[in-house]
Image (cartoon, rainbow, N blue to C red):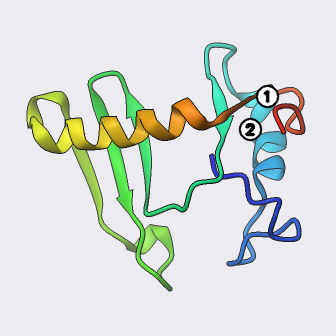
Amino acid sequence: MADTTGLRGRRRDGGPTAGRVLAYYGDRMPASVEVRLHDTPLYNSIYRFDDEMIVNVHAYGVLAAYTPTMHLRRIDGQFFHTYVESYERVWASARPVSLGNPEEGR
């Protein structure tokens, strides 16, 4: 999850900060879910589930709900592996955060 608190507590598009999102979902997620915050520029959102992932491609000035989404499976070969490598590079540099305390990990 992108940590946008450096933008005066609000995202550039007026959306909620990571802290507000974590405060809402934190109590609703199972203990097995691990969340980390990162500061990298977002070109896509990647939701990974073992051998499958959903990649939502970002387009400037367009809400994510209106941009293309790809459902990739490990059998898709290079597309899947390209996004796994990207995801893992961001994940490795991201800061773990406790779902009970969104300020932790800063």
Residue 97 coordinates in the image, percent (x, y): 76, 30
Residue shown at 42% from the left, 39% from the top: 87
User: Taking 32 as reference, is 3 left or right?
Assistant: right
Indicate the amino acid at tag 1.
Answer: Leu
Determine the image quadrant of residue 54.
top left
Disc 2 is placed on an element classified as helix
Residue shown at 40% from the left, 33% from the top: 48
What residue is shown with label 1? Answer: 99
User: Taking 75 as reference, is 59 left or right?
Assistant: right
Could you give the CA–CA distance between mark 1 and mark 2, rounded to whole angstroms? Answer: 8 Å
Q: Residue furthest bottom?
A: 61
Residue nearest the viewer, comparing 84 with 61: 84
For the C terminus, the image quarter is top right
Residue 1 coordinates in the image, percent (x, y): 62, 46
Residue 82 coordinates in the image, percent (x, y): 24, 42
**Relative to 50, is 82 above or below?**
below
What residue is shown with label 2? Answer: 25
Label located before the other in sequence (1 or 2): 2
Residue shown at 46% from the left, 68% from the top: 65
Indicate the amino acid at tag 2.
Answer: Tyr
Q: Which mark is residue 7?
A: none
